Image (cartoon, grey):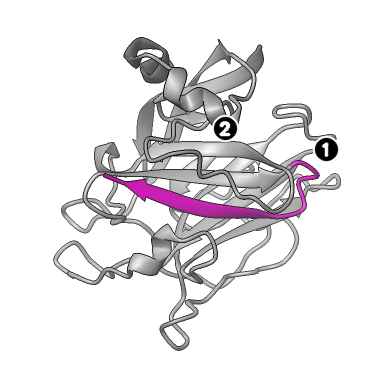
Amino acid sequence: MAKVYEIIDFQRRETGSKELITKFGGQPDWVAIEDWPVSAGWENRKMTFIGQIFLKKNMLGNQQDLMVYLFMTQPECFEDSFYDPDIAAWEGGETAVRIQRLDGVQTPISGASGPTVFDENDAQYEYLPVLKEIQEADEISQGAYAQLDSEQFDCIDIDKIGGTPAFFQGDDTPQEGCWKLLLQLHCNFLPFVLRAGGSPTMFVFVSKDFEKGGILIQDS
């Protein structure tokens, strides 16, 4: 069995505090250097900061404290109809994951601000996930998805940190390298806007050596 952290709710707060925490929205709390990615297809357009995951030592098998930052090319406001389908692709150039090691750092550094998530009123807040520690079965093999019944699938088809990805369009685990699920989010059921398709689920993976990461999206 594997330790998993189910996201059961989000607590909204005003932006501005700089802390080494897991959050969505606001601005990145950089540990080492500012490392804001830009879109591959839209010249000099900064990707939107989605959130950061604070992985304390041994939380997912990591040997030291890490901060993982998530970015995606997104519209500028709620009424903006912008959408780039390349966000769904593993190497589409419109999503990015940055990983920084704390190495004893206790206070985040400052950096230039950039686009961040907003709600349906174009208000910008930070959202702190409320986590519940649960247990899941170890990784499901590629052929096992078809054998899951609806109840078994529903158990893994939750917003969470860690665990087994609840793929609904076949096993989409990256083929090159060894990866583990960092985050699974159902994009249309969040307190902030995340435009990723009709009924999308976002899967964030990190390599098992915690050196790199990536994002893919399945959409029904």
Q: Is residue 34 above or below residue 168?
A: below
Which residue is found at the position 36% from the left and 18% from the top?
154
Residue 64 point in image, percent of width and height: 83, 37
Q: Is residue 53 above or below residue 122?
A: above
State the count of labels. 2
Residue 218, labelled with which disc?
none
Residue 142, labelled with which disc?
2
Residue 111 point in image, percent of width and height: 60, 69
Residue 183 point in image, percent of width and height: 52, 38
- Give the SS element for disc 2: helix
Q: Is residue 164 left or right of residue 187?
A: right
Q: Is residue 99 above or below residue 170?
A: below
Neighbor class of circle 1 (other Cα within 10 Å; few <14, some 14-19, many 20+) is some
Check if residue 212 falls in the magenta segment: yes
Residue 103 point in image, percent of width and height: 85, 47
Which region shows up in magenta?
208-220
Q: Is residue 7 visible?
A: no
The quarter of the image holding the C terminus is top left
Image quadrant in which you'd find residue 189: top left
Which residue is found at the position 54% from the left and 22% from the top?
5
Q: Is residue 11 visible?
A: yes
Please state which of residues 174 and 11 is positioned toward the viewer in this rendering: 174
Neighbor class of circle 2 (other Cα within 10 Å; few <14, some 14-19, many 20+) is few
Which residue has dot 1 on it? 64
* First along the sequence among labels 1 and 2: 1
Q: Is residue 106 left or right of residue 117?
A: right
Which residue is found at the position 71% from the left and 27% from the top?
59
The quarter of the image holding the N terminus is top right
Q: Amino acid at mark 1?
A: Gln
Q: Is residue 140 above or below residue 18?
A: above
Check if residue 189 falls in the magenta segment: no
